[in-house]
Amino acid sequence: MNTAMDSSQFKFKVILSFFPKILKSKRTNIFSPLIRHIPGVFFLLLLTFTPYAFFRSATRMPQNLPPQRNLLQLLGISPSPESIDYVQNKTQFQLHNLLTEQRHPKTWNLSEVVRQGFLPGLKALLAVDEDITKKLENFSYEMKTCEELTKAFEESFLGHKKIYIYGCGATGRLAKQMESSFWRPFWKKIKSERKIWTKLKTQLGESIEDRLMGEMTGADKALISSLEGLEDLQLIGRLQLEEKKIKKGDLVICVTEGGETSSVIGTILAALDLWKKEGNFDPLESRKSLYFIYNNPDSTLLPLERSRRVIEEPGISKINLTTGPQAISGSTRMQATTIETFVIGTILETALERTLRKFLTKKEMSHLGFESSLSLEERLGNFPNILNQLKKSLPSISLFTEMEAKTYEEGHFTTYFANRGLITVFIDSTERSPTFRLLPLDTVKEKQRRCWVQLWTSATNLQEAWEKFLGRTFRGLSSAFYERAFEEEIEDPFLKKAALESLKNAGDDQQFLYDFSLSESNLSWRGPKAGDLGVCVLISPEEKELEDEHSHFRDFLRLFIKEKARIAGLAISDKSYGEIEEIIKKILEFNLRKEGCLVVVNVSSKNDPFHLNQQIALKMLLNAHSTAVMTYLGRVIGNTMTNVSPSNLKLVGRATYLVQSHVNDILVKPQWIKRYGLFPLISYGEANAVLFESIAFLKQKKDMTQQTAEVALSIIRILESIRLQEGISNERALEIVKNQGLRNYLLELIEEK
């Protein structure tokens, strides 16, 4: 069944979309009395349906093509077996009706706003984060379950049980952050306090830092790049749970932005099975240990069988964090993951404080960063202040955004340097690749830089950098554990092929491909050149290291200044802009006004030993910043993700809908109709067939096409073929993509001549 609207439905929706605007217009006040009366209603319906009937009749007989020729006939192509299978059998992954996939009104014309100025573009992006504030202000229903999760954390700490936080993509990186940014650094600090640790280890166990595990679909390699085929398998979630030896009674928290991710659903259902298979199953007991956190309304998820199994399961606790559409449609790395990170991190920190107060004095708690006891509600109430502080810093953020955008526009590269903020910076950097179709992070095998961005940290070699990053050794997927299950249990031939191929690139050996250290080899062949940008990221109390002439932060700044490269400083700090600026002025080799920019966001770390609020501020800053950069460079049209990489079934669906909606949007514009006549609006199946042709074409020419997006290629090929009344090849469409770009091409089609 085709879940997208058909041609007639689309036309009807287009015409009706103008109807509310007519009624609101001051020029149509003469119709107001009619609306209050039934005859008037019929009159208005007549006004609506008459032009619609005429329009529909006209589109049945397009003026520019023989009626019997549809789009695929024009292009001279037939749907591939994979396309036919997707349209007919993968309807559960055609998710463009989900709320997170819709376009947000506050950023509707973002691509044009950013071209007019970075400051208004950034304001529009951060305005969408206000939806998080509204959600947290109306949190009474979810608060009860959040308190239950807080208690579950406490009982797990005291009962020496495992805590397993699992996600996929952006939420998988969230899970890693819970472990490696918040949990492990906190216990590393406690273990350095001998008196405090002596008190705690007998109560909480010697290995408490190892009992909280953040895991994602595909393990640690997926931090860097997605592994095709794995996200779409419930099987992988079950296998990873099994490999980590999670047992009945362990705390399992599964997080999915959309609420429909197969691997995450597979994980929570496998954890539920641990309870069910032992007999005497009591859902009131299992729900105390099993949590499913997501960001779409239940009403939109219930038609999906896999989501319905979880939502209607009484043995699983649910926390719905729906905020609405994302700033970029479908880009759940933004608001959806922000609220999830903030809420889960806040619950974890609150539970830890309540547990430690059972054993430590008030003075000892203050020494660890818990100066006073705060309720969960009070901690969640910090979010509006974080957002307000970001908004205050927008003028300096916009300068930074302009600097990075110009760096890429001129053909140069960016290097970020971070320690405390390492994972947050890393996540934003790697998520740019699938979101905006950039080349992934360079491996050590590359002869020269290809990826626009790279990340360094205070480490002298590759393995030391991974240890600093993760707080532990690298964890990959073992072929010996997963391969046989993939071979025997994956029935879908396309998914099996993709999963087995991804498994080859997910093992422990993958860590040796990436080096984030300040090693000599990195400095020699990936070091800065004139015109590049170096970004120094600090989270309190790292500002003090700027005053140390021998610190790695100072070394990094000197390196870029020496090469006459651009430099920027990002400080998420307890200190004010003025205080940080005074420190910067003492660095003799750094003239702030001449050579770079400084961004300071004043967010307190009081009562926040995880520095969660500062990390959230950094995340939101980088998300808005990188989105504005890529929008300026033409990788967003309106507020749609037209450069998305269709690397899994959900993203294929998103890409298909983007092709269909952008093409049909042009076909109904008066400028197009006047110039080229009427043409039937394309169907979801037609868009999908062309998309799969584009995917196959770009895979064959991977070395030549590099960062070319299948969506842009498909849109241009379709529209140009209709315009010329002859099917053009992918090669010809690719030339237009390279020479003109999608944004300029679409503007030229409808501009007045």
Image (tube, grey):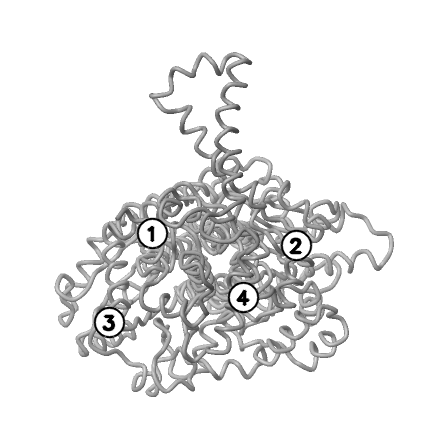
Q: In 3D space, how far apart are the residues under numbered discs 3 and 2 (Cα atoms)? A: 58 Å
Q: Residue at x 47, y 41 (%)?
A: 378
Q: Check residue 629 in the rendering and tell me which mark sits there, or answer none.
A: none
Mark 3 or mark 1, which is nearer to you? Answer: 1
Residue occupying the point 75% across, 51% down: 286
- Residue topped by disc 3: 548
- When the figure is inspected, residue 250 is found, relative to residue 514, above or below; the finding is above
Which amino acid lies under the numbered mark 4 shown in the image of this protein?
Gly
Quadrant of the rendered structure where residue 175 is? Answer: bottom right
Which residue is tagged 1? 111
Q: Amino acid at mark 1?
A: Ser
> Residues at badges 4 and 3 in contact (C-beta under 8 Å)?
no
Q: CA gap, disc 4 to disc 2?
A: 26 Å
Q: Nearer the viewer, mark 4 or mark 2?
A: 4
Q: Residues within 10 Å of mark 1 (few under 14, many from 20)?
A: many
Q: Nearer the viewer, residue 222 or 700?
A: 700
Q: CA distance from mark 1 to mark 2?
A: 31 Å
Q: Please, what is the three-letter code of the amino acid marked with disc 3?
A: Asp
- Callouts 1 and 2 close, C-beta under 8 Å: no
Q: Secondary structure at mark 1?
A: helix
Label 4 vs label 1, nearer the camera: 4
Residue under label 2: 91
The dot on residue 76 is 4
